[in-house]
């Protein structure tokens, strides 16, 4: 009879099984570690990208702040320059007004005293007067040569006119025309008087009126 001792073989089997299990455990552990490392690398990459974006935005903001700082660094100088320019414009405007304004008023007087012409006013205003107050409408047949001015003064846009006319109706017609003019307002006729012209012997009306002018 042959006897077989299987005891050593069982021990060998147990030893072999234990080695494979340990190896599997090591592989699993290494895999977990690798996964964690990969996860950390990905996480770090995402955070680095976010940091880069924030840094670029910060650089843009800082650049804008620097530019604004440069612009406002000479703000006081710019304000002074603008003030000087405005002062010059005001001075030029006043000079032009003083030079062209009185000239425009004199031209308006010339138109008013020119045969066939009249004061500067809106046509609708004349038409309205024809309906509401025909007596306030200038007489187109009036001869302006029946009246002449002898003096004109302008002080701070307050004027005084003085002259002679053939009769009171001529003075009224002149006043009627100035009242309609866009250049004259607040007209006041001062007391008139009569005098005889030494050259012609004609009896004339000496008149004077005050007004304010627009220009």
Image (cartoon, rainbow, N blue to C red):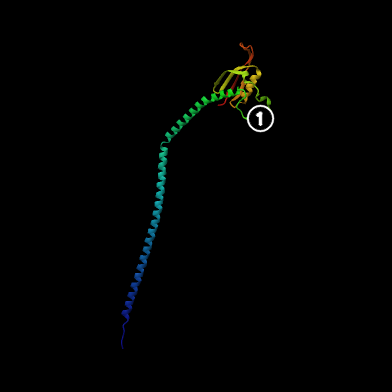
Q: Quadrant of residue 75?
A: top left
Query: Residue sitting at 63 percent across and 30 percent down?
Result: 123
- Viewer-proximal residue, 39 or 181? 181
- Viewer-proximal residue, 184 or 31? 184
Residue 168 rendering spot, x and y as whole percentages: 65, 18
Locate the N terminus and report the quarter of the image it occupies. Answer: bottom left
Vertical arrangement, residue 17 with respect to residue 114, above or below: below
Residue 183 rendering spot, x and y as whole percentages: 58, 26
Residue 135 rendering spot, x and y as whole percentages: 68, 24
> Quick check: 37 left or right of 86?
left
Count how many numbered circles sit on residues in the image.
Answer: 1
Q: Quadrant of residue 120?
A: top right
- Viewer-proximal residue, 95 or 10? 95
Locate the C terminus and report the quarter of the image it occupies. Answer: top right
* Disc 1 secondary structure class: helix
Vertical arrangement, residue 101 with respect to residue 63, above or below: above
Pointer 1 local density, CA inside 10 Å: few below 14, some 14–19, many at least 20 = few
Query: Residue sitting at 46 percent across and 29 percent down?
Result: 88
Point out the residue furthest to the bottom here.
1
Point out the residue furthest to the front here.
116
Residue 12 rendering spot, x and y as whole percentages: 32, 77
Residue bearing mark 1? 127
Query: Residue sitting at 41 percent across and 50 percent down?
Result: 54
Vertical arrangement, residue 132 with respect to residue 56, above or below: above
């Amino acid at each position: 009879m042959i006897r077989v001792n299987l005891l050593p073989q069982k021990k060998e089997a147990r030893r072999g099984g234990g080695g494979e299990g340990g190896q599997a455990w090591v592989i699993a552990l290494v895999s977990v570690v690798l996964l964690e490392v990969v996860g950390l690398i990905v996480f770090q990459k995402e955070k680095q990208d976010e940091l880069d974006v924030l840094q670029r935005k910060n650089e843009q903001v800082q650049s804008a702040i620097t530019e604004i700082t440069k612009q406002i660094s000479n703000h006081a100088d710019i304000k002074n320059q603008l003030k000087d320019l405005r002062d010059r414009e005001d001075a030029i405007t006043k000079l032009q007004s003083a030079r062209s304004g009185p000239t425009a008023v004199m031209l308006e007087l010339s138109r008013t005293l020119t045969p066939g012409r009249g004061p500067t006013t809106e046509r609708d205003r004349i038409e309205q007067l024809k309906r509401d107050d025909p007596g306030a409408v200038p007489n187109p047949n009036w001869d302006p040569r029946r009246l002449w001015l002898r003096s004109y003064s302008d002080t701070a846009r307050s004027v005084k006119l003085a002259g002679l006319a053939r009769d009171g109706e001529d003075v009224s017609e002149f006043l009627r025309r100035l009242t309609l003019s866009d250049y004259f307002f607040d007209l006041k006729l001062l007391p008139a008087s009569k005098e005889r012209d030494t050259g012609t012997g004609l009896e004339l009306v000496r008149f004077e009126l005050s007004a304010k002018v627009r220009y």
